Amino acid sequence: RRSRCSERPKSDRCSIDLPPNHDRPSESRNHPPGEVLAGGQLEDPTLDEEVQLAIRRVRRAKAVRPRQAKGLNKSYLDRFITAQPATPWGVRNKSMLALGYEILARRSELVALKQSDVEFRPDGTHQVLIPRSKADPFGNGRLAFTSPSTSQLLNDWLEWRGGGQYLFCPIYRGKPIDRSLSATSVKRLIKSGAALAGVDPAEILMFSGHSMRVGAAQDLLIAGHDTAAIMRAGGWKSLAVLTRYLESAEHNVWA
């Protein structure tokens, strides 16, 4: 197969090399964006075999492991919830932490939930419809379920919240504002919860808005659930992606 790059003078051929000051090899794959090229009906030069070989050289030379957020497992979750104040903000934060953990929510999924996405069940739990996610751009949705304890926290919040469109909302001067929270508010919630619980500041830096999803997946593995059950609970389509979440779990198969 003839390379597209071979049609150019040798001095202009694909000369991709180690990107300066790049920490991760994945950064070498980000430009130009394929969506822009496809939209303009242009051929994507990054698919050329010479470019692909060069990218493989970069990845071998810069063997940096992807950074994974620290998992917010059940022991952390209980501490963060217990540390919340007895205020409307505390009531909201408790339910957000518990629900985000049990439905393995990405931060964007958690703040996008609406009250109509949550259904109370006769057994004292809730069924939650996550209508759209990063892995589900066409909005097929996935169902998730809560424990009775999380349902109680959610009921406490909804009793104070009252009617409205979004499940979780900002609070201003002690009153709910019917609009969605920002995705970054989930990260702030986790870090502030860690601080209230007395977690070491250096450890707090390791948490992110993704920590509830990571920690819940690891806890499910340790509890003995199989891969299919974990993938179904978190809406994963790729086993390779799930494996990255689970590799830091403190799970000794020989114990």
Image (cartoon, rainbow, N blue to C red):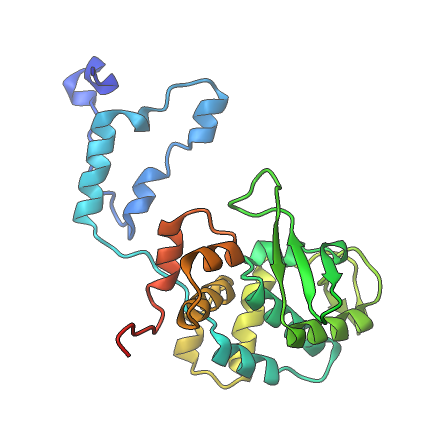
Count of numbered badges drawn on the protein = 0
Which image quadrant for residue 224?
bottom left
Q: Which residue is drawn at 20% across and 33% down?
A: 53
Q: Is residue 247 left or right of residue 41?
A: left
Q: Is residue 127 left or right of residue 244?
A: right
Q: In this view, does 7 lie to the left or right of 242?
A: left
Q: Where is residue 12 in the image (x, y as percent from the top left)?
A: 21, 21
Q: Residue at x 54, y 71 (%)?
A: 190
Up-down: is 41 above or below 88?
Answer: above
Up-down: is 200 above or below 39?
Answer: below
Which image quadrant for residue 143?
bottom right
Q: Nearer the viewer, residue 243 or 26?
A: 243
Which residue is outermost to the right? 163
Q: Position of residue 17 (x, y in %)?
A: 20, 38
The quarter in which the N terminus is drawn is top left
Q: Which of 56 and 241 is in front in this view?
A: 241
The quarter in which the C terminus is drawn is bottom left
Q: Residue at x 50, y 76 (%)?
A: 74
Up-down: is 207 above or below 106?
Answer: below
Q: Which residue is drawn at 36% across and 24% down?
A: 44
Q: Where is residue 226 in the image (x, y as percent from the top left)?
A: 42, 61
Q: Nearer the viewer, residue 158 or 4?
A: 158
Up-down: is 148 above or below 69?
Answer: below
**Whether residue 16 is visible:** no
**Whether residue 58 is visible:** yes
Q: Position of residue 55 (x, y in %)?
A: 24, 37
